[in-house]
Image: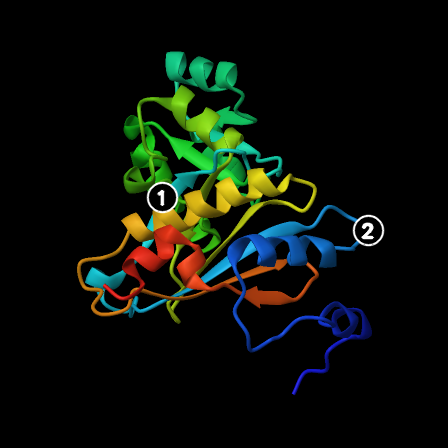
Amino acid sequence: MARIGKRLKNAYQGIDRDGFMPLDDALRLIKSKATAKFDETIEVAMNLGIDPRHADQMVRGMVTLPNGTGKTVRVAVFARANKAEEALAAGADIVGADDLAEKIQAGEINFDRCIATPDMMAVVGKLGKILGPRGLMPNPKLGTVTPNVTEAVKAAKGGSVEFRAEKTGIVHAGVGKASFSDDALLENIRAFIGAINRARPTGAKGQYIERISLSSTMGPGVKLDLSTVPTASSTANA
């Protein structure tokens, strides 16, 4: 059994690890425990009543947080000619075509999000074994394969978050920094939970959202009282 470090042990003081807290109170408590020497990320983890091994129970999508994530996102775009110019004008960090593919094949992957225009997928498709395992493969369902590169780049830079259920049915994401105001974080948290709600798969039966927890990068986790999160409680017992 892993030992809990002294710092985390101290952080758990005053926290009922078996209890459930209202969202507002839980957020304030988590922020008070985010005492690392850097600006910790506030994270949401959701246990869903799904089995991702079945195609009709997969939960995956993208959501734009109203107040951003507080993280600098490096964006690469596969595009040519006018679309390449649009991507650069929108703020893309890396833009290319075959030359970008060659760099990726050589192991040069210094970006956090990858976008492609539809005509570039013949090139990008060959990179699936490299980009796929890293969660970087462009996907039309996520809006990262699109002719509208300007909108896609701005969304990636402005705080869009990709989510995908793990094998255990857990979805998690960073929803801002501890330095954000309570109101900004609450808006982001509700937006994220709302997106998971809307992504409920057709194969999900019974209770969909089973548990939600808040934590910070280096801090303890707190379980939420679902009745205090309308977007969660509305389908908790659907």
| Element at label 1 | helix
**Which residue is labeled 1 in the image?**
126
**Which residue is labeled 2 in the image?**
37
Residue 104's tag is none
Towards the viewer: 6 or 145: 6
Amino acid carrying label 2: it is: Lys
Q: Residue at x 66, y 66 (%)?
A: 220
Depth check, mark 2 against mark 1: the one in front is: 2
Q: Is residue 44 above or below residue 11?
A: above
Q: Residue at x 78, y 55 (%)?
A: 35
Q: Position of residue 186 (x, y in %)?
A: 53, 44
- Please indicate whether residue 42 sits to the left or right of residue 89 in the image: right
- Please indicate whether residue 33 sits to the left or right of residue 73 in the image: right
- As measured in the structure, the alpha-carbon distance from the residue carrying label 2 to the one carrying label 1 is 42 Å
Quadrant in the picture for the N terminus: bottom right
Answer yes or no: is residue 136 visible. Answer: no
Q: Residue at x 55, y 74 (%)?
A: 19
Q: Quadrant of residue 118?
A: top left
Dot 2 or dot 1: first in sequence order is 2
Circles 2 and 1, Cβ within 8 Å, touching? The answer is no
Q: Residue at x 76, y 74 (%)?
A: 9
